[in-house]
Amino acid sequence: MDGSHLLSDRRTLLAGIAALGLTACGGKSGKDGRTKLVLGDQVHLLQAKAEAAKALDDLPYDIEWANFVGAAPLLEALNAGAVDTAPAGDLPVVLAAAAGAPLKIIAGTIFSMRDIGIIVPKGSPIRTVADLAGKRVIVSSARGSISHYLLLEALREAKVDKSKVDIGFMLPNDAAAAFAAGRIDIWATFGTYQIAAELNGARLIRDGEGINSPYALIAASQAVLDDPRRRAALRDILARFQKAALWGKDHPDDYAALIVQHTKVDPRVAAIMARRQRGLLVPPDAAVITPLQRVVDRFHAESELPRHIDVSSIVDAGVFPA
């Protein structure tokens, strides 16, 4: 997600919010005046896992789910006050904050750095990142994504001037089709797209280990954090999300089946994803802040952030359950 364009298309955003039946007032009141949270999700996976784990039984407040295809529109909705929470990658959250979105990080989720990588087709003569000089690399999904950061830092690590690499950006679905058809020689990607390509013979030349932060994030709007009743509900829902994460860890086959159901990916891809991405929640303490600050500092040094962010200033550690 390109932070400079985070808030650029308000009409598209509002149309999407209207289609979801949400309003800019978020989720202040549920039935009979009960507290209500509007929970953001991507591809229904958080909701499906929570429901499968029976983590949402006997809620003392109301919830509404709002599903999005990616981090950028989800964080747009959070900025507009249409959702109260947003699970997303670390850099999209930071870029949203840098663009002025009123949010705070309330939890981290453990992320496998093996599931982000620079890949080449089977039989490619390219063997190392140093071989990327003079080549065109496609990044998914956009400027400012975790894949973009991986590429820039991998080039720096290999002492390759980024100006010597032709970097393009393409949405993951489009890039996957182009890569499979042989129209992309080098692809920086992530998650199910990377796993599927590797299962079909693609070769990994660098993953995120030692470069990317090992955490994804859960962000919440400042408005919900400032409301004592909804803040208390947030604390409770995080505990329920942790229960769901533990269920996924203990039932990887069932979790993989949910991934297939909601994303339609190859069951082999889902099985790998379910075993790598357990999604266990951690408090947004120094263990999360320190590696994320390193990422932010490097990305800012590459002129890929609209402004520098002190990560500790966009953290609210008081919501995470004890």
Image (cartoon, grey):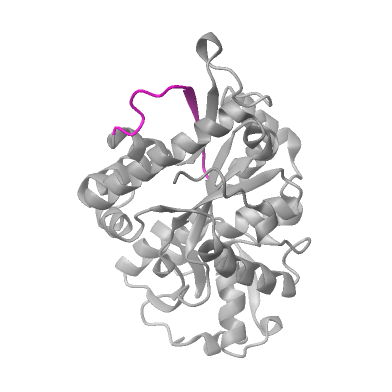
Say if 250 sits above or below 201 in the image.
above
Residue at figure coordinates x 64%, y 29% from the top left: 227
Q: Front-most of 31 and 89? A: 31
Would you say residue 139 is visible in this rendering? no
Q: Position of residue 4 (x, y in %)?
A: 76, 55
Res 169 quadrant in image: bottom right
Residue at figure coordinates x 56%, y 55% from the top left: 171
Say if 266 sits above or below 9 in the image.
below
Q: Front-most of 167 and 92? A: 92
Say if 49 sits above or below 173 in the image.
above
Q: Front-most of 174 and 261? A: 261
Q: Position of residue 204 (x, y in %)?
A: 40, 77
Where are the magenta residues, as a range? Answer: 54-69
Residue at figure coordinates x 53%, y 89% from the top left: 131
Res 133 quadrant in image: bottom right
Residue at figure coordinates x 48%, y 25% from the top left: 63
In-image side of 58 versus 103 (left or right): left
Q: Front-most of 16 and 61? A: 61
